[in-house]
Amino acid sequence: MRGFERGIYTVCILSLLLMGSANAQYWYQFGARGGITSTGNSGASVSIQTITPQTSDFGSIGYWVGEDLSNGAFLQAGYVIENQSGSYPSFCDMSGCSNYQQLNAGDAQWFYEYFPAGFSGGFLGRIGPADSAGRNGTFHSYSFYFTNGQWDFAVDGNVVGNTTLGTSTSGSNAPVAFGEIANTTGVAATLPHVIFNNLSAYKNGAWFPAQSGTAYIGYGVGSLTNLKNPYGVEEITNRVNYFAVGSGLPQPRNNSQLWSLGYGLSVVSAYGNLSSSGAYVAYSNVKISAPQSVQLSGNTRVVFAGWKGTGIGSYSGPLDSVTLAMDSNITETAQWQTQYLLNVSSPYGQTYGSGWYALGSSAGYGIRNGTVPTSATSREVFEDWSNGNAALGGTATMNGPTNINATWTQQFLVTLQSQYGNATGGGWYNYGGEAKIGINIGNITVSPSERIAFYQWSNGNLNRSFFLNVTGPQFLTAQFRKIGLATFNPQNANGESLGNVTLYMGNSTVGQSEFLFENQSYTISYAYYKGVRMIVSDTFTFSSSGPVDVKLPVYNVQIATRDLFGQPIQSAVSVRFSNDSVLRATTGSSGMINFTNVPYGYVNVTASNLGITQQAVARNGGTTSLLFVSNLDMAIFAGVIAAIAGAFFVARHFARRPGQSSAQQA
């Protein structure tokens, strides 16, 4: 391979100029060449670690990527470290060198170099300014590729020069990535380890990493070979296409394999049937993807949360579809988040909050309007949620699928209307609730004997204030009517007025004068008179202001005390009425006493004369007579008895038996 055996001719020429000597004869080269799959390319690239400062007693140090082209031309790019400080040209072509610049021994600066087919002259190419290869330990890419009819040279993707070399391909040649000491003597410098990464070939407008690489440890064309090359090359950290060059490294046999084809990709996932494993070409790009979610049931799912990758070229992050660079064995584990469905439902109104939520998260839910009209006089009012929350909104901790239902209460409108005063108690009430209905106006005077008064509500309720059980919309009107002044006149059956009477309508007392609704019937249910409750049941129609006669069930009681011959006897009388009141009197010489307007019922009468007591019961009127034996009666009875006795004696005297004397009969 003439090209890479030439090495960095730049270093050779410039070092000779500075040293003034031509006795440097060794070009030590050590590194890797790409496998057969990287041949037939239109360019090559590698990433090289900048290690500086470095020194060599003689010759210069370089690290580069290069290759022979199909027509025998050669080109390379990398960085160079001079062993002497001095003025160096920055650009050389077939017409000569120009733009000299000061470079310091041990520092690193990029360069590119090319040899047209059949050319054996000096340096053609360019050297970057001092320290242009970057800070110590940093990595930079160096490449060349054919485009638009020429070969471009680039450092970190930035084109720094170009040339034409009569061909666009490497043919059967593969790219190489070497460390090199150029034009040195037999004294070998100690070189620190420099890492090369991602040796690639340019094909069809894209870069492809070398799928395999082999070791090369040798010399450039024309150099002496009696001294063994002391430098080595080694793949490090088991990374494909990742190797170090320098002193103290192994020296594998030339063309022995440094890295082999392919890496393994393992995809691990608990859901979605994603788990798999496979082998892929080293440095190739492999696309993996996961579904955004996997349904476990109607109300449980897992949502893709991202990949967690291990290995060089792996991906860790939230994207569900990514392309991996297979720079090593890679394991990608799918991360999933469990989600539960929150279902917020309501027969009325507009709810919010339904949806999927992560396990353990707080989900906000609610209803936007707590009152929903169903008609002009009915509506639904939010009461609470099935979880006990009485507020319009709340939060739920999503530890599982959750259903939250709104409970509503039906309400009806109670509308009140009144021509007079102010009706109270109207408004919205729950179904089955109680509304306290009232009217707060008194009677309205029309004249001293006439007024306008509340009569009833349109539903027939006669009370100014009452409780209404609301089971539907209600429209109530307070109705008013004219009332007149009624003057009550309790009477007996003879039309005689009775005093100290208390009248009742129902269970309510009636005063002597009352305002009553005109043209309406009323009933005096009972009355209290002389302490006795009397059933009256007197119904009358009140037409206008005026007197109202009320007949009470009263009667007169007459007590007569007589002797056996019907003659009046004066007697002390005690009368106990049905109300347990007692009246004591005497019948006088007439033997008669009258009690007027006695309430219907019984009267117990007790009369005494000459130590003799008589009792009787008078019921509901009439005359009650009690008989006594008077002194006259006793005298008459005594005379009669004496007469009877005398007659008996005479009779016995003359009724003797025959043969008896009068004396014997006596």
Image (cartoon, rainbow, N blue to C red):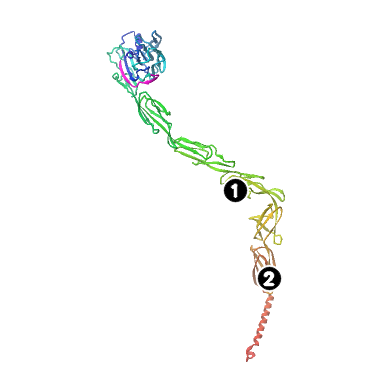
The reply, left or right, for residue 271 in relation to residue 424 is left
At x 41% / y 31%, what residue is drawn?
335
> Label 2's element?
strand
**Other-residue count near label 2 (Cα within 10 Å), few / some / many at <14 / 14–19 / ≥20:** many
Q: Amino acid at mark 2?
A: Thr
Which of the 4 quarters of the picture holds residue 172? top left
Question: Is the C terminus in the top left, top right, bottom left or bottom right quadrant?
Answer: bottom right
The residue at which mark 2 appears reads as 561
Furthest residue toward left: 226
Q: Is residue 457 magenta?
A: no
Q: 659 or 606, which lies in front?
A: 659
Q: Position of residue 371 (x, y in %)?
A: 56, 39
- Say if residue 46 shows up in the picture: no
Q: Position of residue 663 (x, y in %)?
A: 64, 90
> Label 1's element?
strand
Which is closer to the viewer, label 2 or label 1?
A: 1
Q: 640 or 403, which lies in front?
A: 403
- Magenta part of the chain: 203-218
The residue at which mark 1 appears reads as 467
